[in-house]
Amino acid sequence: MRELFFRLFSDTPFGAGVTIESFNIWHILYILIIFGGAISAAILMRSKDMSVKEKTLRILGYLLVISYVADFFVHDFVYADCVDGAYEAAGLNMDKLPFHICTVLCPIIAFVQFNKKFHRFIEPIAALAIVAPLMYLTYPSTGVGGEPWCYRTVQTMFFHGVEFAWGFLTVAFGKTKLEYKNVWKAAVVLVGIALWAKLGNTLLGYNWFFLESDPFGIGLPPIALLFLVPIAIFAMVNIIYGISYGVIAVMRKRGWLNKEQQQTQEEAEQ
């Protein structure tokens, strides 16, 4: 049984000789499925009652948490090494601990989605839940190298895809609106995440949030990365805010805003 699990959770469960790599056809297919699914859901549910939309967001919240927590139970098999035909258990994958922006957003999203006391933070969390998975899905690292349907790839793409869908649909459904006057809140959250990741790196000797090893490839020291990594992500947040304003303007002009969205928009502008 144990040997079977090593095989099933390996990068080549079927030995098909097919590999997903950054920007190859399989990677592009995953992007189309994830982004296309989120956009299609926003369009198809545009006229649905808010209670239905809220139920959808809750389901996404549950799926995100289940995907994240359940993954820890199979790390031994997923990241095992095969030496001379014998598998060696890998133990915990440190990369999956909640110190990267995408992984730490999982428990934060759970609090924001399921606890009304944290609803006040929904706008910056939704914005970051769009930006962080979007950046990862565009240029994945841990999700490539195996067969497109192996567990490691499917789980990684599913987790980031659901996180992106939650953030995107939270805005698209009108549960929150990205108002530029509030963009500073995302900066505050990013500073908190950076300090949290730096604490983890210092105590456990890792490279969460890419604060210890230069992701830009120009040899920047860790002290510079502590500032530049959050700044780069915050720049992307600003772009998403700008796109949101543009999309709302087009939808308003063409009369595509439903009553709830129109009311949310008018209240935000008052």
Image (tube, grey):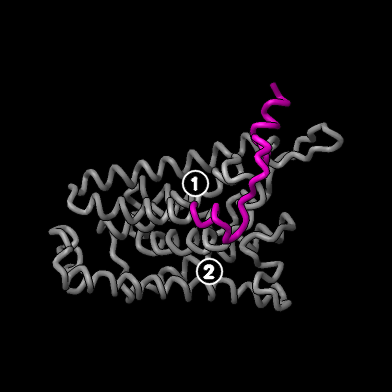
Characterize the local packing of mark 1: few (<14), some (14-19) or many (20 or more) Cα atoms within 10 angstroms.
some
Magenta residues span 1-29
> Which residue is rendered at x = 70% and y = 42% of the image?
79
| Residue at horizontal 65 percent and vertical 74 percent from the top | 216
Q: Position of residue 102 (x, y in %)?
A: 53, 56
Residue 81 drawn at (x, y percent):
78, 40
Label 2 or label 1, whichever comes before in sequence order? 1
* Mark carried by residue 158: 1
Q: Which residue is mark 2?
A: 191
Q: Quadrant of residue 3?
A: top right
Q: Position of residue 155 (x, y in %)?
A: 55, 43
Q: Quarter of the image holding residue 42? A: bottom left
Query: Which quadrant, please, contains the C terminus?
Result: bottom left
Residue flagged by tag 2: what amino acid is it? Answer: Val
Rendered position, 87 above or below 11? above
Q: Secondary structure at mark 2?
A: helix
Q: CA distance from mark 2 to mark 1?
A: 27 Å
